[in-house]
Amino acid sequence: MIDSSLDTRDPEWIVDDNLLRDEGVFFGQTKAEKSHKVWAINALYVGKNAALKKQIDFIDQEIEYLETVQQAYDEKLSLLYTNQLALSKALPHNNHDFYNRLITTLVYIIILGTVFPTVLDWTSWRGSYAPFLAFGVYLFGSLSLFSSKSVVYFFNTTVAKESEREFYKIIIEQLLIPFVAATFLVIFGLESQGTVNALMLWLLLLFLFVFTGKGIMVAVYGLHKSYTQLLDNRRQRNTYKNLIKDKMALIEDLKRDYEEARVKKRSLAQEKLSRELQLNFNLNEAERKVALFESEYALAWQFSANDDEQVHFFQ
C-alpha cells in the first residue's frame, strides 16, 4: 500500500492542492517568476526519493546478505544430508554368532544332561559312592578341554599353534581322555547287561565325550568372545544412531534458520516493492503538483493580461 501521507514539516502550500492552486493564481496574477516555486516542488519530492533510494539500497544489501546465508545453508544442508546417508550406510551389522553359540551350548548341555541318567543307572549297582565317581568321570571325559579349540572341529595345526603344546599332549587330552573315561564307565558298571549293550554304551559315551563334550567347551570358549562382539556391535550401532540423530538435529536447526531467512527475505522484498512504488508515486506526484501549479499560474497570468488590456482600452 502506498503511503500518501506527507511529513508535517513539508510546506503546506505544496501539500494542499487548494493552497497550491492559490499559490499559482497569486503568482500568475502578479506575474512573478515561477521557476523557484517549481524548483521547490521538485526539490521536495527529490529529497523524499533520495531517502527512499537509500532505504532501497539498504534493503538490497540485506537481501543480498540473506541470499548468501541461504546459499551457505544449502551447502551445509547438502553436506549434512550426505554425512547422514554415509552414516546410515555405515551402520555396523550384527555379524556375530553369539545366539548361535548360545543355542549350541544349551543343546550340548541338554544332550549331556539327558545321557547322564543312563550312566548313573549303569553304575548304580556299585553302591552309594558310585554316583559321585560316575559323575566325576563323566565330567572328566566330557569337559576336559584346556584350549579354545578341539582337533575334532579345527585343523590340527591351528589347535597346536594356539595351544603352544606338543601335539601328542593335545591328542591325549582330547581323544585319549574321552576313550579312557568311556571305557572306565562301561567296565565299572558292567554287570549282566550283555556285551552288545556295553558296546553300544561305550560307543555312545566315546562319541559323546569327543564331539558333544568338546563341542560344548569350544562353544563356551567362543561364547564370551561372541558376546563381547555383540556388545561392541550394539555400542557401535548406538554411537552411529546418536551421530545420525545429531545430524538430524543440525539439519532441523538449519532448516529452521533457512526458513527464517526466507521469510525475512520475502518481507524485505515486500518492503522494497512498497518503497519503489512510493518512489514512483513521488515522481508522478511531483509532476502533477508542478502541472497543477503551472496550470493555475498560466490561467491567472492570462486572466490578468486580459484585465490589463480592458483597462487600457477604456482609458
Image (cartoon, grey):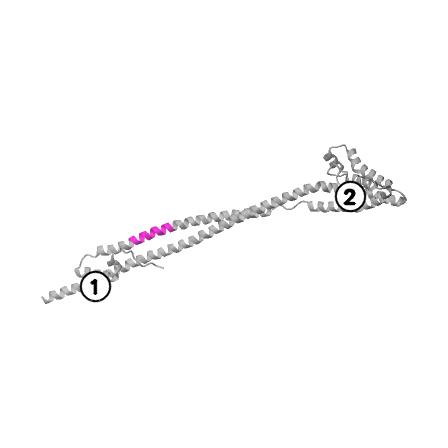
Q: Which mark is residue 225?
A: none
Kind of residue at badge 2: Thr
Residue 291 point in image, percent of width and height: 26, 60
State which quadrant residue 274 falls in: bottom left
How many residues crowd mark 2 within 10 Å: few (<14), some (14–19), many (20+)?
many
Q: Is residue 6 left or right of residue 220?
A: left
Secondary structure beneath label 2: helix
Visible residue check, residue 249: yes
Q: Is residue 29 left or right of residue 152?
A: left
Residue 304 point in image, percent of width and height: 16, 63
Between 268 and 284, which is closer to the camera in this rendering? 268
Q: Nearer the viewer's eye, disc 1 or disc 2?
A: 2
The residue range painted magenta reads: 47-59
**Mark 1 and mark 2 residues within 8 Å of each other at the beta carbon:** no
Is 53 part of what is drawn in magenta?
Answer: yes
**Residue occupied by mark 1:** 299
Q: Compared with residue 46, is residue 306 higher up or lower down, i.e. above or below?
A: below
Secondary structure beneath label 1: helix
**Residue occupied by mark 2:** 212
Residue 286 point in image, percent of width and height: 28, 57
Kind of residue at badge 1: Leu
Q: Residue at x 13, y 66 (%)?
A: 310
User: Which residue extends farthest left?
Assistant: 315
How many residues crowd mark 1 within 10 Å: few (<14), some (14–19), many (20+)?
some
Between 301 and 22, which is closer to the camera in this rendering? 22
Q: Is residue 55 left or right of residue 172?
A: left
